[in-house]
Image (cartoon, rainbow, N blue to C red):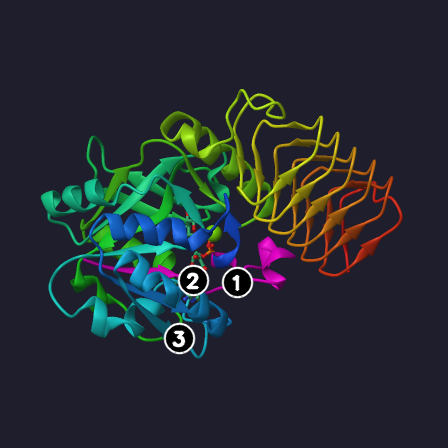
Amino acid sequence: MKALILVGGFGTRLRPLTLTLPKPLVEFANKPMILHQIEHLAKAGVRDIVLAVNYRPEIMVAVLKQYEEKFNVKITFSVETEPLGTAGPLALAREILGKDDSCFFVLNSDVICDYPFDKLASFHKAHGGEGTIIVTKVDDPSKYGVVVNHANSSKIERFVEKPQTFISNKINAGIYVLNPSVLDRIELKPTSIEKEVFPFIAEDGQLHTFDLEGFWMDVGQPKDFLIGTCLYLSHLAKNQPEMLASPSCDYVHKGNVLVDPSAKIGKDCRIGPNVVIGPNCVIGDGVRLQRCVILEGAIVKDFAWVHSSIIGWHSSIGRWSRVEGNSVLGDDVTIKDEIYVNGGSILPHKSIAANITEPQIIM
Ligand code: GDD
Ligand code: MG
């Protein structure tokens, strides 16, 4: 089978992390976001993966080429000279996606779930329509594509991208399976699949929904990245508890703690629930971590407290400091001792020596 992953876009909503790495390479639960998807695609028997890129392709190529052998897949980079949106990239990759008459998967690169590719493909083949999109339910649908089905049917009646008024809380989860015939509906120019393609396939009665079971999150912005991390860790606790630090471990508090084996953790810490600690991180003595992500090589010094925040690669949090309120530290940020940071979005390489009491961007 074939798949295309949409990895373009500038990832501006995930700054300052995306100032250092393209969004799909930012580690989610200690693994590049896109690797979660590649692993699941490979497991479902996909051998041809197209990465639709328009932003810093060199970094992506260097990292992703190594996965080809590991997962026995062929990864082709389809590089746009101008951003082609969410549909244009399918036209650009027509040669691969349309090389035979089998269906192909399309994925937004920033969605996390327990990707049900096998079930999705079977369902799609059974109904015989041109496309199937995975849907899930959310409390606030306004920032997503919203779907309305025909009564008692998987067939979609309406697809509205980011509606201004409430239509339904059933949303596009950003994962599709499409027949090659859909390529005939897309021209090679900047095009939105959500606004310029799906509404018309739906009008023709050819677009169906597949209900997602379990967790889902678009982790393309810091607040949602943290929510997605909590959902994913709970999923691991239920299905692969051996991946997590044992709840009987002396520093683990209320579970859901994922620690890279190379990380060092000091004495008398209280860590959890919902914490990810990356490779080569150093956590001092008496540190309190709760609902946060500590990326590779970061240092949290003695008696610091980090809550609901993302600490960027190789950053350092001083002794007795406190970081909270959806703060995001870029690469190599230093927070001095005894500093309070609330909702700070701090650009790479900054050193912070005064309190940040209100959410703000520090450049
Ligand atoms: N190659 C390429 N070129 N990829 C792009 C481009 C482009 O010009 N623009 C965006 N993308 C990629 C992004 O990297 C992301 O993986 C995907 O397309 C969707 O773009 P987002 O910017 O993340 O869109 P969104 O989150 O606002 O909305 C989309 O996702 C929601 C689910 O998370 C839509 O598909 C919604 O309908 C959907 O509900
Ligand atoms: Mg998104």
User: Callout 3 environment at 10 Å: few (<14), some (14 to 19), or many (20+)?
Assistant: many
Does mark 2's beta carbon lie closer than 8 Å to ligand 1? yes
What x and y, as percent, mark residue 65?
Answer: 37, 67
Distance (Cα) linking label 1 and label 3: 14 Å
Does residue 193 appear in the picture of this structure?
yes
Mark 3 falls on what kind of element?
A: strand
| Label 2 vs 1, first from the N-terminus | 2
| Label 1 vs 3, first from the N-terminus | 1
Camera-side mark, 2 or 1: 1
Residue found 75% across the figure and 61% down from its top: 349
Q: Using the rendered view, name the quadrant where residue 286 is placed.
A: top right
Residue 197 lies, with reference to residue 288, above or below; the image says below
Q: Is residue 273 left or right of residue 66?
A: right
What x and y, as percent, mark residue 99?
Answer: 15, 70
Residue 16 within the segment the image draws in magenta: yes
Q: Is residue 77 left or right of residue 318?
A: left
Q: Which residue is mark 1?
A: 22
| Label 3 vs 2, first from the N-terminus | 2
Residue 308 within the segment the image draws in magenta: no
What x and y, as percent, mark residue 170?
Answer: 37, 36
User: Are dots 2 and 1 in contact, CB under 8 Å?
Assistant: yes
Q: Which residue is mark 3?
A: 79
User: Callout 1 environment at 10 Å: few (<14), some (14 to 19), or many (20+)?
Assistant: many
Disc on res. 7? 2
Residue found 28% across the figure and 51% down from its top: 41
Q: Of the residues shown, which amino acid type is indicated by label 2?
A: Val
What stretch of residues is rendered in magenta?
1-24
**Which quadrant is home to the C terminus?**
bottom right
User: Callout 2 environment at 10 Å: few (<14), some (14 to 19), or many (20+)?
Assistant: many
Distance (Cα) linking label 2 and label 1: 9 Å
Quadrant holding ligand 1? bottom left
